């Protein structure tokens, strides 16, 4: 049977939504709002007030509220690779639950803290600096949900016998999420390398994260590409679904 | 295995919708929707005067905030039956439902907090109210993606006898588009885009209500057509 369109179209469309999402994410946090690189936790009150009242924060907020639904799609792309591995469904459910909890606490809520400040310029400096702290701490200090996601991802790669993703990526992922934990002290430091804008907790952690993300992404691209057509869920649309989902007949 | 379980879950939707409609009608904050232009003192006075009504609905919504989840769960099961190469769209859909529901619950908590101790500094009551509106109106991103995942799965369905009719996909795309204006409620305090405006408030809620009713009908048909065909989401 000849088909004009790719049989993996669902996987490719969702896959290509990931760079699109990260581009918007980058635009929102860097050139649009200048929230990143993070301002100092010990900035002076007038500086905090001026920043929190900038109109650009609202524009960034609008863009993020429209685009943040793509974060679940990128997580689903990662999940799909775990599904192909010879590991328990518990691994992909872990990633799924981590993704659900992480999206609000690590992304939407911090963005809203900044947006709320800019929405009503009448707020007092005390309220604005609370929103400023809450925004940065929730954004940079959210670790648990993401670490558990990448732990499940790394372990699944290491335990997998189908070689869906390379083993070295598993070790790399485990190392990466362990090193992310070093952002934990942002909750107690107001300056220095372990503050939320610090050399270790922000710059080093971000460099590690971004490069790791690019490597994972490339590996997933190759994995989708390599997936044999016979293994696809729609390999034989006339066949009963049992053989595709692995459910007992 | 038959579809009895799915049908039971599906039929939890009508009472859930009735309760959500009741919460909407009883909620003092929505009749009429509080204007974003109110001063902190006016907002605080509103929550002082309407503390009982707000708290009653906050309690009700705390109980029923997740009551549409079974409808979405059945949708996810049916999306997973669609013949595409993977269940990636199903997973994205499920995560979106979890995230979107959390935003709704946070809105409910913020209004509850505002009414719990309305003698608080008016500035803080106003902040809680702003935050509630932000979480209630603005974060349309997940429901938009949810609808697009559904639509995409229908468009890509390779079954000779598709699970969903194509018009259901078009309907989901239209719904997603109609929800977009709400995101802009953050930018303005007056006019149709403001959080109490014709586009951000009325259109958003009417669209959502119509969407739930239509999806219920679509799903009922899909589940009935499934018959005894074994399909499990893993």
Image: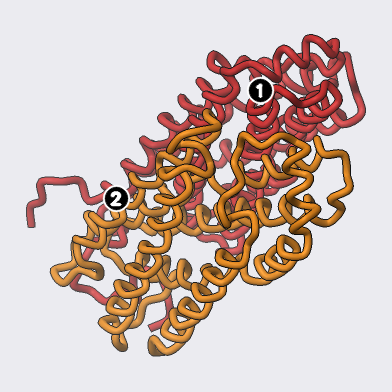
Chain colours: A red, B orange
The residue lying toward the viewer, choosing from A66 and A199, is: A66
The residue lying toward the viewer, choosing from B164 and A130, is: A130
Q: Is residue B151 visible?
A: yes
- The extreme left residue here reads A2
Give the letter of the chain under mark 1. A
- Mark 1 lies on a secondary structure that is helix
User: What residue is shown at x 70% (from left), y 37% (from top)?
Assistant: A177
- Residue, disc 2: B173
The residue lying toward the viewer, choosing from A39 and A102, is: A39
Location of residue B54 (image quadrant): bottom right
Q: Quadrant of the N terminus of chain B?
A: bottom left
What crowding class fits label 2: few (fewer than 14 Cα within 10 Å), some (14-19), or many (20 or more)?
A: some
Instruction: Report the side of B155 relative to A47 (left or right).
Output: left
- Residue, disc 1: A206
Instruction: Report the side of B226 relative to B17 (left or right).
Output: left
User: What residue is shown at x 8% (from left), y 57% (from top)?
Assistant: A1
Let me know if marks 1 and 2 both belong to one chain: no
Instruction: From the top left corner, tell me how far across and down residue B133 is, in percent.
Output: 61, 45
Front label number (1 vs 2): 2
Q: Is residue A163 visible?
A: no
- Mark 2 lies on a secondary structure that is helix
Q: Which mark is residue A158?
A: none
Q: CA distance from mark 1 to mark 2?
A: 36 Å
Using the image, determine if residue A103 lies above or below residue B56.
above
User: What residue is shown at x 56% (from left), y 30% (from top)?
Assistant: A61
Instruction: From the top left corner, tell me how far across and down residue B3 is, in percent.
Output: 39, 86
Using the image, determine if residue B128 lies above or below residue A111.
below
Give the letter of the chain under mark 2. B
Location of residue B55 (image quadrant): bottom right
Location of residue B89 (image quadrant): bottom left
Instruction: From the top left corner, tell me how far across and down residue B5 is, in percent.
Output: 46, 86
């Amino acid at each position: 049977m000849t088909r004009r369109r790719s049989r993996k179209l669902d996987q490719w469309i969702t896959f290509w939504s990931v760079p699109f999402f990260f581009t918007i994410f980058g635009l929102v946090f860097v050139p649009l709002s200048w929230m990143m690189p993070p301002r100092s936790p010990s900035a002076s009150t007038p500086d905090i007030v001026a920043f929190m009242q900038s109109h650009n924060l609202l524009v960034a907020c609008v863009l993020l509220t429209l685009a943040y639904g793509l974060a679940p799609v990128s997580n689903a792309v990662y999940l799909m690779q775990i599904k192909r591995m010879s590991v328990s469904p518990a691994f992909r459910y872990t990633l799924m639950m981590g993704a659900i909890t992480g999206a609000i606490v690590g992304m939407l809520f911090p963005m809203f803290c900044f947006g709320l400040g800019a929405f009503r310029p009448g707020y007092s400096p005390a309220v604005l600096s609370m929103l400023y702290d809450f925004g940065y701490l929730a954004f940079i200090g959210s670790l648990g949900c993401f670490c558990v996601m990448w732990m499940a991802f790394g372990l699944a790669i290491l335990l997998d016998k189908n070689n869906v993703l390379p083993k070295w990526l598993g070790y790399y992922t485990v190392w990466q999420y362990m090193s992310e934990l070093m952002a934990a002290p942002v909750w107690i430091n107001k300056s220095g390398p372990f503050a939320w804008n610090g050399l270790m907790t922000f710059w080093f952690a971000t460099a590690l994260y971004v490069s790791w993300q690019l490597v994972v992404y490339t590996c997933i691209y190759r994995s989708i590409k390599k997936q044999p057509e016979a293994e696809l869920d729609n390999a034989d649309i006339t066949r009963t679904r049992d053989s595709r989902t692995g459910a007992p007949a | 295995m038959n579809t009895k379980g799915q049908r039971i879950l599906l039929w939890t939707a009508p009472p859930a919708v009735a309760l959500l409609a009741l919460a909407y009608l009883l909620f003092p904050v929505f009749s009429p929707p509080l204007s974003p232009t109110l001063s902190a003192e006016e907002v605080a006075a509103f929550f002082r005067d309407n503390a009982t009504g707000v708290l009653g609905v906050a309690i009700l919504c705390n109980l029923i905030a997740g009551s549409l989840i079974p409808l979405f769960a059945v949708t996810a099961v049916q999306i997973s039956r669609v013949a595409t190469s993977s269940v990636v769209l199903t997973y994205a859909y499920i995560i979106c439902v979890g995230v979107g529901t959390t935003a709704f619950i946070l809105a409910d908590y913020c209004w509850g907090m505002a009414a719990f101790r309305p003698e608080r500094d008016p500035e803080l009551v106003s902040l809680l109210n702003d935050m509630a509106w932000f979480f209630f109106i603005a974060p349309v991103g997940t429901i938009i993606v949810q609808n697009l995942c559904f639509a995409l799965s229908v468009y890509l369905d390779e079954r000779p006898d598709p699970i969903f009719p194509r018009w259901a996909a078009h309907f989901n795309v239209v719904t997603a588009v109609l929800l977009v204006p709400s995101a802009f409620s953050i930018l303005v305090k007056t006019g149709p885009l403001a959080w109490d405006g014709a586009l951000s408030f009325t259109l958003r809620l009417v669209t959502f209500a119509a969407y739930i009713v239509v999806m219920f009908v679509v799903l009922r048909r899909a589940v009935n057509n499934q018959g005894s065909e074994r399909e499990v989401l893993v």
